Image (cartoon, grey):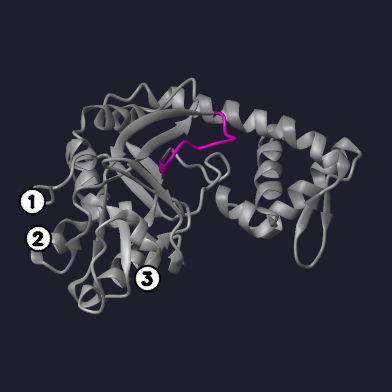
Amino acid sequence: MDSLDDMILLAEVAETGSFTQGGQRLGIPKSTVSQRIAQLEARLGLRLLNRSTRQVTLTAAGEVYLAYCRRVREEAQKAAVAMGHLKTQPEGQLRITCPEITASHFMPRFLHGFTGRHPGITVELLATNRPLDLLRERIDFAFRVGVPQGQDMILRRISAIQRLLVAAPAYLATCTSPSHPAELVQHRCLVHDTQPDWIFLGTEQVSLRPPASFSSDSMGFLLQSTLLGSGIALLPAYVCQPALASGALVRLLPGWTPAPYEMTMIFPSRENPSRAQLAFRDHVGGYDFSAFAAPLPGTE
């Protein structure tokens, strides 16, 4: 192995904080990783890593050297992508992340259509409500709610997401159904952590922060809790479709329109995107997302 390969190895070890995990990313055993890093330090005459039984951290010299190692790794990745362009068919793996509710209620059909047209592409879907670091986690595309902040990424607006105020008949049997948004403060409300303020448009605009009987970053948890009769929730319309159709949920305040929120897709700015990445961008660009933005039939 030459020094450029060792620089790439150092970047992996530094980012994972582990000889074992850094080696796993490159398919190299821990003993070899430790030996190669030691040889690199010997060649440079500088200690790059502090070792302990629990973790590996960078020294001051290692922090400076890591910036150059990352550049070497990025150029190596670009070279590999450029060679991949010589192939005629898109192939390889894409890593995609999205909120858990999007993964369960939208992604199966969306990705089925994509992989059906491109059988040479495999997809790893990371369903999480945490905003992952796309570069560190090697994410190709991230679907997120709202406008992401603090990352140098390309952003593509997907759609407005229509929301509905809903409750189960079991809950409504225990109380008087609200006739105005202001009355929601008197009810048990199930609130998503990222959407504590509920805004309604009708004869006037009403903005309130309902007291949360339950709060969570999981839209799936809020949906299931609402179905059980735990309270009133403001949920994406496309998520409510089966329950509204069956009568398991009832729409409340139909004369008031909850303010929608945005679904966006972000991806790293790469000079040489792979054919698989380009194929996925085309799939997103040609997909009809209008169902997200409109209330469901029968919910007007």
* Label drawn at residue 245: 2
* Residue at horizontal 79 percent and vertical 52 percent from the top: 57
**Crowding near the residue tagged with mark 2, few <14, some 14–19, many ≥20 C-alpha atoms within 10 Å:** some
Front-most of 210 and 295?
210
Give the secondary structure at mark 2.
helix
* Residue at horizontal 21 percent and vertical 57 percent from the top: 240
Residue 121 can be seen in this image: yes
- Residue ID for mark 1: 298
Any magenta on residue 148? Answer: yes
Looking at the rendering, the stretch of residues picked out in magenta corresponds to 143-152
**Crowding near the residue tagged with mark 3, few <14, some 14–19, many ≥20 C-alpha atoms within 10 Å:** some
Front-most of 250 and 141?
250
Give the secondary structure at mark 1.
loop
**x, y percent for residue 181:** 32, 54
**x, y percent for residue 148:** 50, 37
Residue 1 can be seen in this image: no
Any magenta on residue 269? Answer: no
- Residue ID for mark 3: 188
Labels 3 & 1 near each other (Cβ < 8 A)? no
**x, y percent for residue 127:** 39, 55
Report the predominant secondary structure element of the magenta stretch. loop
Mark 2 vs mark 3: which is more N-terminal? 3
Mark 3 vs mark 1: which is more N-terminal? 3
Front-most of 193 and 299?
299
* Residue at horizontal 36 percent and vertical 69 percent from the top: 187
Labels 2 & 3 near each other (Cβ < 8 A)? no
Q: CA distance from mark 2 to mark 1?
A: 8 Å
Residue type at numbered disc 2 = Ala
- Location of residue 210 by image quarter: bottom left
Q: CA distance from mark 2 to mark 3?
A: 23 Å
